[in-house]
């Protein structure tokens, strides 16, 4: 999971990342899909904070966390619940895309 967090940081707050996010903005100016490819610095800091307090078990089973677990972790980390939920959903998608013989452990 830590590697996935760092992967998200590759386009933090750069010109290309901002351009990419604008392509996915909705009528409110939010860009959930864009956040998974190019989070802003604040979003990445929040994600790192939440991941840092997760237990090993939570990290190993992150793709299967219930909404209540995601909310609790976000609240414990004192971060935005939506940002963390988007991150966990994106991580779950990455896990499902991983080669079947590699499983969840390859992204942790």
Image (cartoon, grey):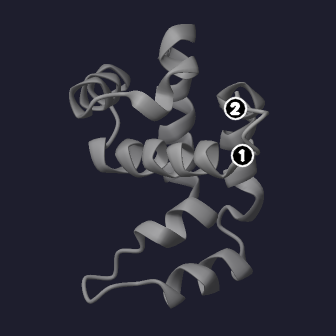
Q: Give the structural element (helix, strand or loop) at label 1.
A: loop
Whole-number angstrom distance, CA of label 2 to CA of label 1: 6 Å
- Above or below residue 37? Residue 29 is below
Kindly indicate the quadrant of the structure image that contains residue 102. top right
Quadrant location of the N terminus in the rendered image? top right
Q: Position of residue 54 (x, y in %)?
A: 49, 16
Kindly indicate the quadrant of the structure image that contains residue 13. bottom right
The crowd level at tag 1 (other Cα within 10 Å; few <14, some 14-19, many 20+) is some
Of the pair 46 and 97, the residue shown nearer to us: 97
Numbered circles on residues, count? 2
- Residue 38 visible, this orientation: no
Quadrant location of the C terminus in the rendered image? top right
- Residue 49 visible, this orientation: yes
Instruction: Report the side of 67 relative to 61 (left or right).
Output: left
Asked if marks 2 and 1 touch (Cβ < 8 Å), the reply is yes
Which residue is depicted at the point 54% across and 26% down?
51
- Above or below residue 86? Residue 108 is above
Q: Give the structural element (helix, strand or loop) at label 2.
A: loop
Which numbered tag is attached to residue 98?
Answer: 1
The crowd level at tag 2 (other Cα within 10 Å; few <14, some 14-19, many 20+) is few
Q: Position of residue 66 (x, y in %)?
A: 28, 29
Q: Position of residue 56 (x, y in %)?
A: 57, 9
Of the pair 36 and 105, the residue shown nearer to us: 105
Which numbered tag is attached to residue 103?
Answer: 2
Q: Position of residue 38 (x, y in %)?
A: 62, 65
């Amino acid at each position: 999971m830590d590697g996935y967090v760092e992967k998200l940081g590759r386009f933090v707050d750069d010109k290309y990342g901002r351009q990419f996010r604008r392509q996915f903005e909705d009528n409110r100016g939010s860009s959930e899909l864009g956040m998974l490819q190019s989070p802003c610095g604040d979003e990445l800091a929040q994600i790192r904070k939440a991941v840092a307090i997760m237990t090993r078990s939570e990290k190993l089973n992150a793709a299967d966390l219930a909404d209540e677990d995601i909310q609790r972790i976000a609240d414990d980390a004192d971060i935005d619940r939506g940002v963390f939920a988007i991150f966990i959903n994106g991580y779950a998608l990455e896990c499902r895309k991983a080669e079947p013989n590699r499983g969840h452990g390859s992204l942790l």
